[in-house]
Amino acid sequence: MIPRRLVVLVLGAAVIAAGLASSASAALFFLFKPTTADAGELVTVRLGGTPVNFTLEQREKPFRNGIRLYLVPSGAAEEVSSRFDPRLHFIGRIVPDRNSRGIVTFRVPPLGSGAYALASWCPACAKNSFGRTFFVQTVPKVSRYRRWMGLRVQMPSARETCPVSETGTYSNGLLSTTVPPGGVLSTRKEADGLSQKLGWLPHRRFPDSLAVRGERLDAPSPPMKVLGVNWGYASSGPGAKGSWASAVKFPSEGCWRISGRVQDISLSYVVKVVADS
């Protein structure tokens, strides 16, 4: 006769094993379409298990908590352990439906050419992942989904033509700015550089301040100088929306990539900087 204590231990082990198997089967993974794109082109990310032709209109309520998505250079993927790592670039938020199906379409940010992995922040995943909420997707050596699990970004050369970002409101869903017509940013010429103010509109209030930087893409140059970043309101009242205004100074005309970051949210765009005549 098997001792009762041994039966309990065996049953307990079986329950734990079943729980681990359940967690593994519910593990998140994401697929890109297409898997190669130029900066500025549209790419769709879908949760594993979501049909290829699935649309937002096909989602079934209730919706689950949103998952933030980021691109990270593949060469740094194993080193990144936090959503606040500056090597991450936020691309959007995916909201699964009741059946864990979800998609999001984003515009590829103007990142350096190369291979990128996908990272995610999923607060609701903590209960099934021993408290973990941040994940970097690894590409298995053998998987039928392998070819869709990474993204290769192509950044056009800025030496011949400046690859300016799309004109108008430029947004990643949580932070937005305005790209001037034709991607041409007019500046005021001063003795020590070219000055301008850049606006940034958050889609929710952040307790931290915004960090802004700029780098020239078409020629060697000192970085853009940030003179100050101020928070303010364009109107008063309970519905008033606040925004940041960053006073900057460029050392020269040319093709510039400008980036703003607050907490884990980053937004980058490219403009051609010219001096007012």
Image: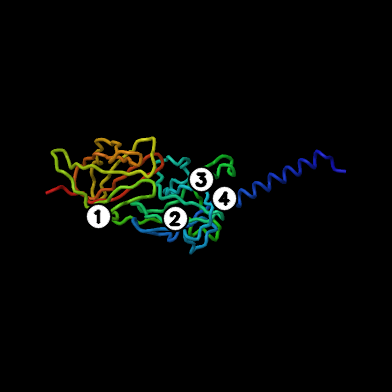
Q: Which residue is the extreme one toward the bottom?
A: 53
- Could you give the CA–CA distance between mark 2 and mark 1, rounded to whole angstroms? 28 Å
Q: What element carries label 3?
A: loop
Along the polypeptide, which appears first: circle 3 or circle 4? Answer: 4
Residue 224 in the image, given as x and y percentages of width and height:
25, 41
Q: Quadrant of the N terminus?
A: top right
- Could you give the CA–CA distance between mark 3 and mark 2, rounded to whole angstroms? 15 Å
Task: Write the residue at 32% across / 39% down.
Answer: 237
* Left or right, 275 with reference to 51: left
To which residue does mark 1 refer? 162
Q: Which residue is the extreme one toward the front?
A: 237
To which residue does mark 3 refer? 122
The residue under label 2 is which amino acid type? Val
Task: Write the residue at 43% across / 40% down.
Answer: 84
Task: Write the residue at 30% across / 38% down.
Answer: 236
Residue 129 in the image, given as x and y percentages of width and height:
58, 43
Q: Is mark 4 on a helix, strand or loop?
A: loop
- Could you give the CA–CA distance between mark 3 and mark 1, rounded to whole angstroms? 36 Å
Residue 27: which numbered mark, if any? 4
Answer whether labels 3 and 4 touch (C-beta < 8 Å). no
The residue under label 1 is which amino acid type? Cys
Please say if 91 is above or below 8. below
